[in-house]
Amino acid sequence: MKRYRRSGQMSGRTRKLMIGGIAVAIAGGAFAISTGVSSAGENCVGLDQALRQNLQFIAGQRSAPDALSDARIANRQAVVDLINQRRAVAGCTANVAAEVPGAAAPATKKPTKRPTTKPPTAATTAPAAPPAAGNAAGEVVCKGSTVTLSGEAGAPFASSGTFPIGTTLKVTNLDNNKSITVKVATPSGSCVLLNNAAFEQVREPGKFLIRRAVIERVG
């Protein structure tokens, strides 16, 4: 009977030791979690990171304090002191500083660019082109204008409301690359109209309108 009783006493003592060990392990784990330092590795990288995080927390509480900030700062300062002791033992020498959350980086002033003065060029100093009627000989005029016939008989000539009588114009039909050079003989309401004879020399069969035309003032 004593043997069984002693065995039972040993079992109870073993259970107490096991429970005590579990409690210590839980307490140690809780402390590691609260401090932000893992007991698994006492290396400078981990210690520096834990120190930086706690310093950031303290700086954040100081930048935006509330009723509990003093107590939080005191608790974290105790953690910071413990981490610094571990860093000293591990030989960590890095200068760890807190980065205040939400703090904006200092703005760098950009150098003011001075406008560069370019010498005048022919394109900027040349006077604006005069109206179509005053363009120099050989210049393309009445850009985008279509050409049709005036219905007038006689030798080839042109009618125009843009150029004075006697002006020489060259009309090219881009659809068939045919051209004719004629003088303005009568006025009209368009840039240029060709009489029947002139129009026949540049027209496409069955068409009474030149949509893609180049008109040049040649004299």
Image: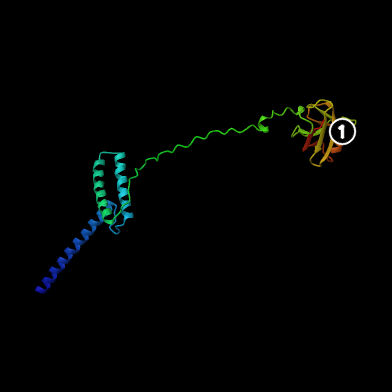
Q: Which of the pair 193/130 is nearer the observer?
A: 130
Q: Report the side of 168 relative to 78 (left or right).
A: right
Q: Is residue 51 above or below residue 22?
A: above
Residue 213, quarter of the rendered image: top right
Q: Which of the pair 75/8 is nearer the observer?
A: 75
Residue 34 visible in the picture = no
Q: How is the image coloured?
A: rainbow
Residue type marked 1: Asn
Q: Which of the pair 60/118 is nearer the observer?
A: 118
Residue that appears at 66% across and 31% down: 124
Q: Measured from the top left, where is residue 22 in percent x and y?
A: 22, 61
Residue 81 visible in the picture = yes
Residue 179, quarter of the rendered image: top right
Residue that appears at 18% across and 61% down: 20
Location of mark 1 (residue): 196
Work out which quarter of the rendered image holds the C terminus and state it.
top right
Q: Is residue 193 above or below residue 46?
A: above
Q: Measured from the top left, where is residue 177 in percent x and y?
A: 81, 41
Q: Measured from the top left, where is residue 189 in percent x and y?
A: 79, 26
Residue that appears at 11% across and 74% down: 3
Q: Report the side of 117 relative to 199 (left or right).
A: left
Q: Measured from the top left, where is residue 218 in percent x and y?
A: 81, 32
Q: Report the side of 21 relative to 161 (left or right).
A: left
From this viewpoint, which residue is outermost toward the left? 2
